[in-house]
Image: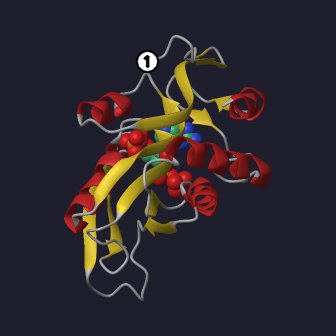
Amino acid sequence: MERLKQFIEKEGKVLNEEVLKVDTFLNHGIHPQLMKEIGIEFAHRFEKDGITKILTLESSGIAPALMTSLSLDCELVFARKRKSITMTDNLFTSSVHSFTKKETSDISVSKSLIHKDDHILIIDDFLANGQAALGLIDLVNQSRASIAGFGIVIEKSFQPGRHLLEEKGFKIESLARISRLSNGQVSFIDPIKQS
Ligand code: G4P
């Protein structure tokens, strides 16, 4: 997605060879017009997949997931990292280990919000090591709903997340695929060469 690539090139900061900071439009500040276009793009890529619900993980997945749910006219649920005081029981829960943050956290979603007849699109801001994705898959599997695929805003293709999901046979649509972060520069996978 050309416009997203322009935002990454103009506003992204390469912190090191593994981490890209995009705090001005995705992870802290949110650019509403870009999010709207991201939602339209994901909706276009999944419009024929019979999506009934979008699942994401708080917090940075919520903005792109919300705009996609508006475009697809379907429901949206976000998994929580910390249980709210109103989430007292009846939860699907999974454990997510972050290699980046070197910590493990529980994620959960109310059993009343995902049903076995749902066909779910999982949206997230970053795909890195794929651990958040695995946790979300676990939550959906517990509900016995089905997964239509993954919509990822920024994929770091040099990390193992995509391979992990491909091995499981999932459809993955990433709007920007980064092949390398080095010397302050972001390199993208050429969309013509990518499989
Ligand atoms: P994984 O889920 O793919 O295994 O990724 P990992 O453990 O490496 O990442 C944990 C958190 O760090 C996630 O956010 C993920 O989106 C974010 N992250 C991973 N790589 C990058 C990167 O290069 N740049 C930025 N900006 N973020 C990255 P989170 O903890 O869920 O945060 P948030 O959703 O509350 O913002």
Q: Is residue 121 left or right of residue 187?
A: left
Quadrant into which the C terminus falls: top left
- Where is residue 144? Give x, y as percent: 21, 64
Is disc 1 placed on a helix, strand or loop?
A: loop
Query: Foreground residue, 64 or 53?
Result: 53
Q: Could you tell me which residue is drawn at 59 percent across and 55 percent down?
A: 68
Relative to 15, residue 189 above or below: above
Disc 1 Cβ-to-ligand 1 distance below 8 Å: no
Q: Could you tell me which residue is drawn at 73 percent across and 53 percent down?
A: 29
Q: Which residue is mark 1?
A: 195
- Where is residue 38? Give x, y as percent: 65, 45
Quadrant into which the N terminus falls: top right
Q: Could one spot residue 103 in this view of the protein?
A: no
Q: Is residue 32 left or right of residue 88?
A: right
- Where is residue 156? Give x, y as percent: 49, 29
Relative to 2, residue 114 above or below: below
Classify 10 Å Cα crowding around label 1: few (below 14), some (14-19), many (20 and above). few
Count of numbered marks: 1
- In this view, the residue farthest toward the front is 48
Q: Is residue 34 left or right of residue 70?
A: right
Query: Foreground residue, 100 or 158?
Result: 158
Residue 66 position by quadrant: bottom right
Residue 182 position by quadrant: top right
Figure coloring? secondary structure
- In this view, the residue farthest toward the top is 193
Query: Foreground residue, 9 or 17?
Result: 9
Q: Could you tell me which residue is drawn at 51 percent across and 10 percent down?
A: 193
Q: Could you tell me which residue is drawn at 42 percent across and 89 percent down?
A: 86
Relative to 95, residue 38 above or below: above
